[in-house]
Image: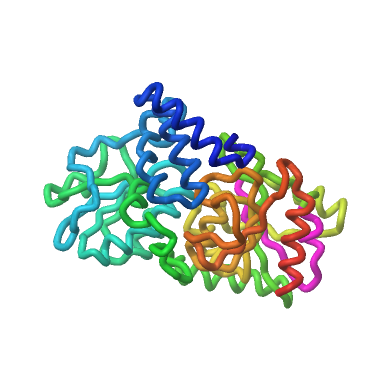
Amino acid sequence: MQRQRRMPEAVERFERSIAADPGYANARFNRAVSLLTQGRFREGWEGYDARFQVPELRRLVSPRPFRQPRWEGQPLAGETILVWGEQGIGDEILHASMIPDLQAMGAKVVVECDPRLVGLFRRSFPGAQVSGRADPPEAPTNDPAIAYQCPMGSLGRWLRDDLARFPAHRGYLQADPGRVEGARARYAELGPGLKIGIAWRTGSHDPRGRNVTLQQLEPVLQRQNAHFVTLQYGDVGNELHELAERSLVRVYRDPTIDPTRDLEGIAAQVAALDMVISTTNAIAHFAGALGTPSLIFVPFAPDWCWLQSGARMPWYPTMRLVRQTAPEEWATTISGVADALDGL
């Protein structure tokens, strides 16, 4: 039912399962996700912690071995709180949007995140102490001054329980200024016109219909007076060559950046571009978090953070969503992206 977007019915079914077995973590987690997808944040967050009890999710959301008490919304003025990343790169970027909220509450914030994000987070959250995830955890996370700890994905229960609590911003991450300048100079050499980054698939083990092909994107890529830059991670050389052979469309690949390992480079690329067009992958999260205008094509049954309807993304105000109207049917969606691009 979730994949059919029948969320109210899905919630009812999961509630019946929970009534029969209150300890059934899969039902509690899926109920939470179904509620969050509908924008029913207060109700959804209450069950979202069940993710830690779902066996299929343990690779992504294994609890960290921190002994400090869990933060449950207590006042933080003068306190130190440890927040730790979970799930994928895109999730860590999205959840990091709540770090400034903690700082505004008067907390000293210690952050544990993917090692590839350390430099970006240190620059973006002045005053926060940031270290890379390691086993055993690195020294900053064991500071005896830490009063509370909280997984980043659970901060929303206390800080984003209503649409009114999503702040208006034009980006909260700060790319390396020198690398942004270098990328901007390289892309200026492509010629006049908009410089647009593109990404067309996710690296997730569960893509759930999010991926498209460059051939499907041709109505967008054939736009005049624009230059396209690939932001896609993975080996895309053959795809770009086939695109050029088939349609004479050339997409620039920046040889100075490894999009899998060099996330500082990806951030600089995204910040240097005029716009990003992407599926719902980590690149979309980079664009939203950096404040780069973006058009995101959203699958029929998206992950909860993209919600089930609407053109706006509450986590990322500079983003516009173009939604798939039927499973696996991308032509109309991509046509909508092309039309939106023509309207600029």
Observer able to see residue 13 = yes
Q: Where residue 22 appears, x then y in whole percent?
A: 35, 26
Q: Where residue 53 appears, x then y in whole percent?
A: 37, 29
Q: Nearer the viewer, residue 215 or 263?
A: 215
Colouring style: rainbow
Q: How many marks?
A: 0
Image point (78%, 73%), residue name? 225
Q: Nearer the viewer, residue 128 or 306?
A: 306
Q: Which residues are magenta?
A: 217-234
Answer left or right for 135 relative to 276: left
Q: Going by the picture, which residue comes out furthest to the left?
A: 144
Q: Nearer the viewer, residue 39 or 132?
A: 39
Observer able to see residue 254 = no
Asked whether residue 131 is drawn in magenta, I would say no
Q: Going by the picture, which residue comes out furthest to the bottom?
A: 192
Query: Which image quarter holds the C terminus?
Result: bottom right
Image point (54%, 41%), residue name? 8
Image point (34%, 61%), residue name? 122
Q: Where residue 263 appears, x then y in whole percent?
A: 49, 54
Answer left or right for 139 relative to 33: left
Answer left or right for 312 relative to 136: right
Image point (78%, 53%), residue name? 332
Q: Where residue 36 appears, x then y in whole percent?
A: 47, 47
